[in-house]
Image (cartoon, rainbow, N blue to C red):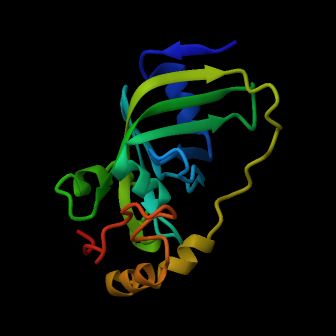
Amino acid sequence: MGKIYERIDGRLRTFIEEQQMFFTATAPLGGDGTINLSPKGLTGSFAVLDEQTVAYLDFAGSNAETIAHLRENGRITLMWCAFQGPPNIVRVHGRGEPVFRDDPRFKELLACFPDVDPSRHGLRAIIVVTAELVRDTCGYAVPFMTYDEDRDLHARRFEREDDESLDGYFHKKEHIASSIDGLPGLPLPLPPTP
């Protein structure tokens, strides 16, 4: 049923790149900490950088659990499901790192996402994940669902923010600078857009 892969290439890479959404899962080291599972979408916000490395754009939102967990321990799993076509589930288990706006790598990484205008979404960081285990499973129980289009609500909400007002928004939210469990989250004040 399932298979383990050495790298993200060929059919596997094509499958990942064709999906309209994926999920991220992270957790703190503490056994009583809050596990986080997040859906991710927006066409063009995910990229396969090489056979072992993927990245996605981390946009403004009401919490920063993924960032906090990655800063603490780096563990992350990404998952894609086939909602159309043959059934399939692909998981990339690995080590992730948030690359913030003031990191020297930020501009070069941002160039990997040419189809997204980050100014419309309050871009906070780019999450880079190095694969340690890549595997697929059957996905036989995943339902058929159709993709209609990306929602424009996120862009409409955050395109009116500049760096200063976005920083103010983040300061008002309880779980941006620290996670639900009190781990360091998004570093504030927010560095300016490069």
In the rendered image, the residue lying farthest to the left is 104
Foreground residue, 153 or 139? Answer: 139
Q: Residue at x 45, y 83 (%)?
A: 169
Relative to 122, residue 111 above or below: above
Q: Quadrant of the N terminus?
A: top right
Can residue 115 be seen by looking at this rendering?
A: no
Foreground residue, 191 or 194? Answer: 191
Q: Quadrant of residue 126?
A: bottom left
Can residue 188 be seen by looking at this rendering?
A: yes
Relative to 177, residue 109 above or below: above
Please state if 138 lies on the left or on the right of 90 as rendered.
right
Q: Quadrant of the C terminus?
A: bottom left
Q: Residue at x 61, y 22 (%)?
A: 136
Foreground residue, 43 or 171? Answer: 171
Relative to 43, residue 3 above or below: above
Please state if 149 lies on the left or on the right of 144 as rendered.
left
